[in-house]
């Protein structure tokens, strides 16, 4: 069974569609990167999944409609909606007490073990913490919850590289397993592409590309082509062409590798390059 | 994860929500009345000190209780003691009105402003339980806590006066404490809590509705909407052919909708002046005074339609606030 299924999901703000008839499905045990330019509808999609906004169409999260059974769903769905949104007055110990008090799947021992690796003190208030420390606390709280779906919306925005690396490392090593599903949006695509199993590109309220990383590696190929083969490469209809050090790099979708190998050196494109090629002209 | 731990009872969650409110609002619910009390006690201590110094050079009255038997004197001193306890409650209750007013305005707004609502909403707690926990603080827990603090302050005031009198050599001053009726006073003070809850519900409901509704400046919404609409309606009354019941418009919109959060406002109705005049003639000693400010008189409001209509309106506004809390997605 899919963890999340969306069918003809539509959401309009003042008549302007933020999500335009979107359909996708996410299987359990996947880490899905929801990637798109600003204003593409990523956050709207996440809000719909979390039951934080109304929408048209069908959406099922763990078999339930988030509009109807939001409270029950929150037993199994966790989210870090943005950086640094913990209430400023709360102390570390109070946050732990409260989440333990209201969440049936929270493990105090786990949470304290995560926090032991940080400099956070039980008496410390959120307002006395740096942005990175707030995210450490939030992540410790969330990882101590044995949820089925974890939604992360720009969880590392504005953090330095040390905190960002640590964030995804903890998530992968200490939290993720084949029963859990993680949906993450971020602009720092390079940093998460090695942990993703699937990508969903969103553009102007629509899905521009939905594929597993394996499919990406199969479908998309980059070829570094010398000037002598450039015309031949263009004839094959590349998605994108850019020039590095006098050589052209072509990005192809669905062209057999042996054929491309005759033109030049092959490599698998990274997600960032694929993203840039797919989103060409978005802001034009 | 087994089935037995897959959900927690709403009662348990509610308990944690109440605790959460106290953590967040400790300053208003606890420290504001305590600090007010400390200031008042310090002032009366200073006054007592100054008075004692002043008295030390003067002949003391030989016998304060010459006019009555010592039993009667002790009895009357006891009522003065009750008055002292109630004075403590009065001070705190004055603070309470302001605290609850701003608490209600911020209750469903502050976490939307700093977006921490997204954290609260990520937990399996329903919006109605959250709103009800805030309502419980505004209507019941904050007043009960305030009365407790008020009684403690009253006891301090009492101790200060008894001590001052004893130091200055006045006989029988301790009767103020031994013959006071702390249990009766406590019961009396607590008996106004249901009255306060019922009476202030329309105002609390309106403030929380504004708090849930306003995108910014809930204070302006809360104050300007009732005041401006009452003004507007009053102006319309100036047009020929339209007669406006100015009194009831202002009473309903502003007094019941905005000011009824101030404790004691239920005493101020049309019968007040007559009641005061009637009782003023019979005040000859402290026990009479204590009878006049018998707080349990507040229960008379339940005999009128006013409070019931107010409660219905308040409940409707709370329901609307819960709905808004659930539906709003501007965070």
Image (spheres, helix red, strand yellow):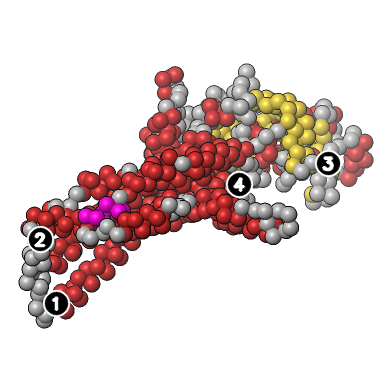
Looking at marks 1 and 2 on the same chain, the residue that comes earlier in the sequence is marked by: 1
SS of the residue under disc 3: strand
Is residue B288 covered in magenta? yes
What's the chain of the residue with tag 4?
Answer: B
Q: Residue at x 40, y 30 (%)?
A: B11
**Which disc number belongs to residue A240?**
3
* Residue A131 seen from this side: no
Mark 2 vs mark 3, foreground winner is 2
Q: Write down the residue under mark 2.
A: B68
Magenta range is B287-293
Real-space CA distance between mark 2 and mark 3, rounded to the nearest whole angstrom: 107 Å
Looking at marks 1 and 4 on the same chain, the residue that comes earlier in the sequence is marked by: 1
How many badges with numbers are in the image? 4
Please name whichever residue, A198 or A51, is drawn nearer the observer in this view of the structure: A51
What's the chain of the residue with tag 1?
Answer: B
Above or below B130: residue A68: above
Give the quadrant of the N terminus of chain A: top right
SS of the residue under disc 2: loop
Question: Answer yes or no: do the residues labelled 3 and 4 have beta carbons within 8 Å?
Answer: no
Q: Are marks 4 and 2 on the same chain?
A: yes
């Amino acid at each position: 069974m899919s963890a999340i299924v969306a069918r003809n999901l539509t959401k309009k703000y003042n008549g302007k569609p933020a999500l335009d008839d979107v359909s996708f499905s996410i299987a359990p045990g996947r880490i899905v990167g929801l990637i798109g330019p600003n204003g593409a509808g990523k956050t709207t999609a996440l809000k719909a999944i979390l039951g934080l906004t109304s929408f048209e169409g069908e959406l099922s999260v763990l078999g339930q409609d988030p509009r109807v059974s939001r409270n029950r769903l929150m037993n199994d769905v966790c989210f870090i909606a943005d950086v640094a949104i913990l209430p400023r007055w709360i102390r570390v110990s109070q946050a732990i007490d409260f989440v333990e008090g209201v969440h049936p799947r929270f493990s105090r021992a786990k949470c304290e073990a995560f926090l032991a690796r940080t400099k956070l003190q039980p008496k410390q208030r959120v307002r006395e913490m740096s942005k990175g420390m707030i995210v450490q606390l939030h992540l410790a709280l969330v990882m101590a919850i044995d949820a089925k779906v974890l939604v992360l919306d720009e969880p590392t925005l504005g953090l330095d590289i040390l905190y960002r690396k640590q964030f995804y490392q903890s998530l992968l090593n200490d939290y993720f397993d084949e029963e859990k599903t993680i949906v993450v949006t971020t602009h720092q695509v390079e940093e998460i592409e090695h942990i993703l199993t699937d990508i969903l590109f969103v553009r102007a309220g629509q899905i521009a590309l939905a594929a597993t990383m394996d499919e990406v590696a199969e479908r998309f190929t980059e070829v570094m082509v010398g000037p002598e083969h450039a015309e031949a490469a263009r004839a094959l209809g590349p998605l994108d062409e850019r020039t590095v050090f006098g050589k052209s790099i072509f990005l192809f979708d669905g062209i057999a590798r042996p054929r491309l190998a005759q033109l030049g050196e092959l490599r698998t494109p990274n997600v960032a390059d694929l993203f840039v090629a797919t989103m060409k002209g978005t802001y034009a | 994860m087994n089935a037995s731990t897959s959900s927690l009872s709403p009662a348990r969650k509610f308990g944690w929500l109440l605790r959460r409110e106290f953590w967040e609002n400790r300053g208003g619910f606890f420290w504001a009345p305590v600090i007010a009390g400390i200031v008042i006690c310090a002032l009366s201590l200073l006054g007592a000190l100054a008075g004692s110094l002043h008295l030390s050079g003067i002949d003391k009255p030989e016998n304060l209780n010459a006019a009555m038997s010592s039993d009667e004197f002790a009895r009357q001193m006891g009522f003065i003691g009750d008055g002292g306890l109630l004075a403590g409650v009065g001070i705190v209750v004055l603070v309470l009105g302001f605290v609850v007013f701003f608490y209600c305005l911020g209750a469903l707004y502050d976490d939307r402003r700093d977006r921490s609502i997204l954290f609260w909403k990520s937990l399996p707690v329903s919006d109605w339980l959250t709103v009800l926990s805030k309502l419980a603080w505004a209507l019941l827990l904050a007043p009960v806590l305030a009365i407790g603090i008020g009684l403690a302050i009253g006891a301090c005031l009492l101790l200060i006066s008894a001590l001052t009198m004893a130091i200055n050599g006045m006989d029988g001053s301790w009767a103020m404490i031994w013959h006071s009726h702390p249990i009766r006073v406590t019961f009396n003070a607590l008996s106004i809590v249901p009255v306060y809850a019922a009476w202030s519900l329309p105002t609390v409901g309106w403030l929380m509705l504004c708090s849930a509704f306003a995108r910014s400046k809930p204070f302006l919404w809360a104050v300007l909407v009732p005041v401006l609409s009452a003004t507007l309606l009053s102006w319309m009354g100036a047009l020929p052919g339209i007669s406006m019941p100015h009194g009831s418009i202002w009473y309903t919109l502003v007094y019941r909708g905005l000011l009824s959060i101030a404790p004691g406002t239920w005493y101020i109705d049309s019968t007040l002046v007559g009641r005061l005049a009637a009782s003023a003639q019979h005040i000859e000693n402290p026990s009479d005074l204590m009878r006049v400010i018998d707080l349990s008189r507040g229960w008379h409001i339940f005999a009128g339609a006013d409070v019931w209509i107010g409660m219905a309106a308040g409940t409707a506004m709370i329901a609307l606030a819960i709905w808004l809390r659930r539906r709003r997605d501007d965070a």
